[in-house]
Image (tube, rainbow, N blue to C red):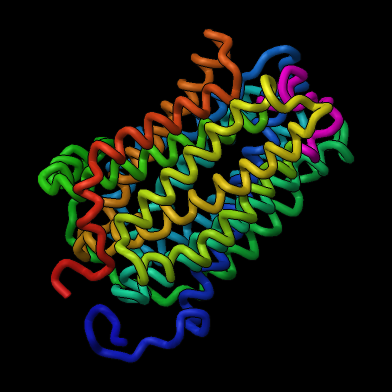
Amino acid sequence: MTDPAGATEKPALLRDRSFQGFLGAQFLGAFNDNLFKQIVLLLAAGSLFPGEDKQGLAFAVFAAPFVLLGGIAGEVSERFSKSRIMVVMKLVEIAILGAGMLALATMSWPAMLGVLALMGVHSAFFGPCKYGGLPEMIGGGPRLLSANAIVAMTTFLAVLLGGALPGPLMDRLTGAVWLVGLPCVLFAVIGLGFALRIAPLPAQRPTLKLRLNPFAGLGDTLRSLTERPALFAIVIGMSLFWFNGGVLNQAINGMAAPAWLDLPDGEKSRVSLLLMAQSVSIVVGSLVAAPLARRFAPNRVVLTGAFGMVAAQTALLAIGPVFTPATGAYAFAVGCLLCTGLFGAIFFVPVNAYLQAAIEAGGRGRAFAANNFLNFLFIFFGGAWYLGLRGHLGLSPTLCTALAGGVMLAYLLRRARHLKSITFEPPHA
């Protein structure tokens, strides 16, 4: 297998020093993001606001920078080396997590929201380099599909650990939650070391003139995507996946209340175990998604993943009417979340590999910035969705997530014919 320029033989993925550095950097970054964010979400759903649930606001603040900075982040990723930007962003991450320690030490809700916003800015610039740089680093075809499976597996393993640890840590560090920030800063420093292992990637458009407008080029990029209806339909499908996932994450935390799982405030570790169950199954799903997509028609694999995920999260509606804390509600929730994670990964891996293969070199950074813009616009909607349905209309957490899944599935079924275009070869291979 040759590189995109066809010049040199590529080593096996897991023996590729550059890919190893990429994996390590993104794994530790995803771990830190999810650890801090989950701590804030647990505080927002519990001790900071007794009787209230302000997770939606935290989600919206984290997502806003992706919406506001998507255009310029994409142009920066094309103007400069993606590998160099990733190194700079790891330096920024160290400073942000230091500020996060202070926010937790003071238990200041505005400071926590400020750190979440900065984390969103960091990720807005890191994302286009991560997804746009992967095809430049490892090539296309089956190799790209395998790389996406490995990246998804390690990313969601980081999500597993980052989402599972806050509960037990908060139970044990009552009054000193800020101590969690110390290993986060250390992991950010280690992540910087990994990022320095990534082989230099040439700037794709070194003469591109950057514009001060934060939405620079975003409109043009979105218009170019809409000119390819099948591609744009799949981009929107991926954004709905993140919308749905964001609502489900909030619902998991919300189900700890007495009407559903009845988990006392001192048992945050049991909430974390729910997230762990989901994340473990995502890791397993990432391992099986690539072989399935090679063996069967990718569009059928994607629809199977979507159906399975939505069916499992809709089944959570049985908690309360059918399953109560005394009759196995917690075990039932674990089973449902195992299924959502498994089928969610089966949906995600082939779709993400397709998006990377379908976009030409020189445009991937801006295209993935636009994709991130849409993803986090929909995550923002997910925060507003949960805040509105749960906080203002009083709907149950389980109904909030069932309705979100229904929206995603309805769209995918309406655009099912576009899913047939999914392939993993570059358009001009």
Q: Position of residue 348 (x, y in %)?
A: 42, 53
Instruction: Residue at 53% x, 57% y: name it.
Output: 90
Q: Quadrant of residue 289?
A: bottom left
Q: Quadrant of residue 203?
A: bottom left
In terms of depth relative to the viewer, which is nearer, 116 or 372?
A: 372
Report the label total.
0
What quarter of the picture does the C terminus occupy? bottom left
Q: In the image, is residue 397 above or below residue 9?
A: above
Identify the magenta region: 254-270
Query: Would residue 71 be found to the left or right of residue 47 on screen?
Result: left
In terms of depth relative to the viewer, which is nearer, 169 or 415?
A: 415
Instruction: Residue at 67% x, 20% y: name it.
Output: 321
Q: In the image, is residue 17 above or below residue 32?
A: below
Q: Position of residue 37 (x, y in %)?
A: 62, 38
Is residue 326 shown to the viewer in this render? yes
What quarter of the picture does the N terminus occupy? bottom left
